[in-house]
Image (tube, grey):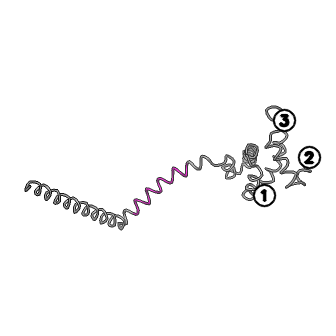
Amino acid sequence: MPRVRAVLGLLAALAALSACGAVAFLAYCVHRDRKRRGDPAFRRRLRDKRGAQRRPAEARGAQVQCLGAPRWRDREHRLGVEHLSNALLVCGQPQELLKVFKHTLPPQVFEMLLRKIPLICQSPGRRGEKSRAVQVLEEIMAENFPNLAKEINL
């Protein structure tokens, strides 16, 4: 029996020592974290690290942007309108895209885009018939821009 008590006492002492060690380790972690967060150099390094992570994400976003957008900076409006009209042709909701273009493009460029729509509508599809997007674009032009549609014989 004395051996069992000695073993149990040893196990209790080991458990108490382990608990004290765990508490001391957690206290040390909290202390180091507070000290690290209060360090101005840490904040600068963290800001630099987050900025470095953000740059590649912005670069990926730039690759996905509309093909016509870089053309506006170069003042190559005709080429930009060409790309945007192709976007209208393949877009699932050309009416919504046209609304976005109306609010974001300069007026003269938006008018160029509207004048480009009938040319897109006249080009035949793969089988010679008009695609659904072309039909929708013709309806949009007739409903929202009747004067322009008459002027360009749509």
Mark 1 packing: few (<14 Cα in 10 Å), some, or many (20+)?
few
Horizontally, residue 65 falls left or right of residue 147, namely left
Q: Quadrant of residue 89?
A: top right
Camera-side residue of 93 and 53: 93
Camera-side residue of 94 and 58: 94
Picture coordinates of residue 55 (x, y %)? Answer: 51, 52
Camera-side residue of 104 and 24: 24
Q: In the rendering, which numbered label is found on residue 107?
A: 1
Amino acid type indicated by mark 2: Asn
Picture coordinates of residue 109 (x, y %)? Answer: 77, 53
Mark 2 packing: few (<14 Cα in 10 Å), some, or many (20+)?
few
Amino acid type indicated by mark 3: Glu
Which badge, 3 or 2, is on the more N-terminal residue?
Answer: 3
Whether residue 13 is situated above or below residue 125 in the rendered picture: below
Q: Quadrant of residue 40?
A: bottom left
Q: Secondary structure at mark 2?
A: loop
Q: Which residue is mark 2?
A: 153
Q: Residue furthest left?
A: 2
Q: In the rendering, which numbered label is found on residue 129?
A: 3
